[in-house]
Image (cartoon, rainbow, N blue to C red):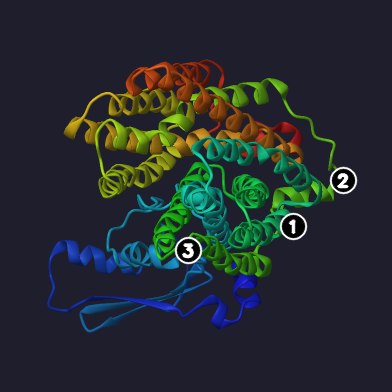
Amino acid sequence: MEVKYARDYCSHVLGPASRVERLWPSAASAATTADSKAGAFAARDTIVAEQDVGDGRFVQREGPFAEYSRVVERRGDGVRDVTTFRLVLPWFGWLFRWPVRATLRSTRRERGVQPAWAPPDRLNAHQVMVLGLLAAVSLSSAFVNTLFTQTVNFAADDFGISEQGQGIAGVIVRFGIVLALPFAVLADRVGRRRMIVLLAWLAPTLASLGAIAPNFWALTATQTIARPLGIALDLLIAVAAAEEMPKNSRAYAVSVLAMASGLGAGVAVIALPLADIGPGAWRLVYVVSLVWLLAALDVSRRLTETPRFEHVVEIHAIGKAHIDRHRLAIIATVAFTANLFIAPASYFQNRYLSDVRGYSAAGISLFTLATATPASLGFVLGGRVADTTGRRRLLAVSLPAATLLLVASFTVGGWPMWLAAFAGGLVAGMAYPAFAVYRTELFPTGRRGQAGGVIVATALIGGSLGLIAAGVLLDLGWSYGAVMGTLALGQAVAATIVLTSYPETAHRSLEEINPEDA
């Protein structure tokens, strides 16, 4: 696989090779140094499994590199060890460059143990490339999904639309989810790659049309189409990742994609100051959508069809798989009940900080940055825990813990509020990979996209009802703490269903979970 992969892409696409050199000088005589010298002549078995080809030369037998070689030679009483490698991780290679180099430079001899930052399984070069490409289009989908929410106030002010009009527009855009379902169904018919590539072009292009909207309702119409396409793209990214990743690293992949999505949404927030340039300048934020066509071009050129869907095509099983209705019911119910709380807790946070705690726009930005950033660390920790110790136990503990902490952040003020929001974001981030990975694991390849579409639609309906309920209760004079505490009962129901009805899927292949795929 690695040899063919390296041959199929010219050097400027693969990028320059990197080099790591280790030296053990002859003057060193400590026992640990002597042991390290001896270890230099042994084949590595960490993120890369080496094969000894003789004369102090090692090549990659299994691992993530498109090209790899290591040469060890004695120099007097010392040892010189030079590793040359090329890691093809589109868009995010810079983020992993340091930990990869640090691992290859390490002199510790831990055989068969993956570094803490790496997935539990040893990925191959193709899986690394696919994960990078999927993360790239996750940036795009998250940007498109965030765009209208971030700019609606500016556009409404420009067009003279009331808050009630904004609310109606928000509901219209949210219920555009029905437009995502055909793409999910088609992905089970014609393939994940075709739909991901198509949506990667369509979603940002249609979102950018908001820049030329002649009125507020035309803007709403463009985003009612674009946002569901971004949601469909996000859904199919998760499906493709589940089908490409090995059995012990599916939740890890979800955590990586979640971090990419957070960055994509962050770009929408970072672009928001463009709206302050002058009247109508909010349109520039929509123009930024076109940047993500670069990601569309990249996946068009390099993304391949998932091997599991290709297997379905080979055995002529398209359209023949069946969805387990019990599994769909429990996953959809959890998505619905959980979002009764999740959506309003996110949506009303800024309003709570402004109206109840008296925070300025700058204060709200600082609070959001300081308390939401830990969620990224939570993604990494949660993905690792979900893959190594299991999804169900993690969810049974983290869902209620995160909920209690987030409800507390709507109840208290001062530093306890910051601490509760910080801890709640961290624990919620830990829950997310296990929460999301179930949506793809419990359904056969031939129906995985369709099932995911139904679940996402159900989650959005639950979130919409939660928003409506929260708004009504707040207008009746309920406190934010009381409203969020009431809606948190949905999370309690979700955690109970997870603990009593969810199967454990960690360490199991998709074929074991869905025997009809075998």
Residue at mark 1:
194
In this view, the residue in front, 219 or 518, is: 219
Q: Is 396 located above or below residue 274 in the figure? A: above
Residue at mark 3:
281
**Is disc 3 surrounded by few (<14), some (14 to 19) or many (20+) residues within 10 Å?**
some
Q: Secondary structure at mark 2?
A: loop
Q: Quadrant of the C terminus?
A: top right
Which residue is at a point 27% across and 63% down the rendered structure image?
107
Q: Amino acid at mark 2?
A: His
In this view, the residue in front, 389 or 346, is: 346
Residue 170, position in %: x, y?
Answer: 57, 39
Q: CA distance from mark 2 to mark 3?
A: 52 Å
Q: Quadrant of the N terminus?
A: bottom right
Which residue is at a point 26% across and 77% down the rendered structure image?
79
Residue at mark 2:
316
Q: Secondary structure at mark 3?
A: loop
Q: Residue 278: which quarter of the image?
A: bottom left
